[in-house]
Image (cartoon, grey):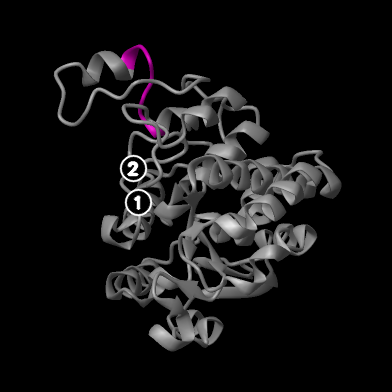
Amino acid sequence: MTKKSVTTEKILKAGNNIRKRILGIALKSGGCYLTQACSSADLVATLYLKILNLGPSLGNRDAILFPGVPSKNNMDYQRGAAYNGYDYKNPDFTKDRFFVSCCHYSSVIYCALVEAGRIDASAIDKFNGDGWNMEMIGAEHSPGFENTAGSLGQTISIAAGTAHAYKLKGHTGKIICMLSDGEIAEGQDWECIQAASFYKLDNFSVFVDVNKQQIEGWTKNVMNTEPLEERFKAFGWACVKVNGHDVEAIINASKTKHKGKPLAILCETDVARGIPLLKTMVPKHFVRIPENQREEFLKFYENM
C-alpha cells in the first residue's frame, strides 16, 4: 500500500461529501441505499484517499452510455470509451487491485471516485439513469467495479483468486476486497476465507463494513454472524476490529503485519452516521424519504 499526504480532516470532509451527494440522490429520486452510505463513507474515503495504491484511471470522466451485454461493440467501447469498471483503476502488477463485493454500495464508490478525482461530479447526475453505466447495483461495467458484485457474484473468491495468481507469478501488488457484514452469512464467503488461509495469501486484505443490518433487518436477528473477529482468527486470518469512522484507526489497521496470513479489518459503523434523522428509520436497507419528513431532510441536506 502507498503513502499519501492527505490529512484526516480532508478524508472526513470527503466522507461527509459522499453522504451529502447520496442524500441528494435520495431527495431527487425518492430513495436509494442511503444507510450504506452513512456507514461506509469514511471507510471508502480512507481507502481511496490514503490506503489504496492505484494506478492512474483510464476510465471516462463522465458517465457513458452502456451498450449492453453481450454486444458486438463491447471491444470498441473497451478500447475507446473505457466502459469497464476495471479501467477506473488501471492497475499494473505493482499496484493494488480493489474489488468491491457490496453491490448496493455503488453510489458510495462513484462519489468516492469524485472525491479522489477519478470521475467528474457531473457523472453523478446520471446515477441510475436508463442507459447509463452509473447503475444502482454495481457490476463489471460500473466505475470502480471489476465484476458483478455481491456474494452471489462471488467477489471475495474472485479477489482471493487474483491474490493467489499474483503470488504464483511473483507480482508485488496487493489485493484488497470490501465486504459488508450481511453478506458474510453466505457459505461461499467462508469457503474462500478458508482457502485464502490455506494458501497463505498475505497479499490479500478485506475491509468489512460491520453496520449490523441487512435487507431484512438487523443481522443479529436474521442470521447472526458474530463473533466475526474470533471466526476470522479461527480460520487462520489476522484480524483487527476498529471504529469504522475513525480514520487513523483504519489506516493503522491497514498496516498490521500479517506474514503468511490474509488480513481482515472489521470496521464497526453506524447506519445513521452523519444523518441523525435516519435514527428513527433504521434498520433500513433501502431508504425512501417520507413525504412528511421531506422538508426536514431537505433543510438538513442544505446545511451539511
Tell me which residue sits at (50%, 86%) in the image: 226
**Left or right: where does residue 166 sit relative to residue 98?**
left
Q: Residue 191: x percent and y percent?
A: 29, 73
- Write down the residue under mark 2: 139
Tell me which residue sits at (58%, 74%) in the image: 239
Tell me which residue sits at (31%, 27%) in the image: 131
Q: Which mark is residue 149?
A: 1
Residue 113 lies, with reference to residue 189, above or below; the image says above
Residue lying furthest front in this view? 292
Q: Of the residues shown, which amino acid type is indicated by label 2?
A: Ala
Q: Which mark is residue 27?
A: none
Front-most of residues 258 and 215? 215
For the record, the magenta segment spans: 79-85
Front-most of residues 27 and 141? 27
Q: Is residue 193 visible?
A: yes
Labels 2 and 1 touching (C-beta < 8 A): yes
Q: Residue 94: x percent and y percent?
A: 52, 36
Identify the mark nearer the N-term, 2 or 1. 2
- Element type at mark 1: loop
Residue 115 lies, with reference to residue 169, above or below; the image says above
**Left or right: where does residue 30 sit relative to residue 76?**
right
Residue 81 forms part of the magenta stretch = yes
Q: Residue 203: x percent and y percent?
A: 50, 55
Q: Of the residues shown, which amino acid type is indicated by label 1?
A: Ala
Q: Quadrant of residue 132?
A: top left
Residue 275 forms part of the magenta stretch = no
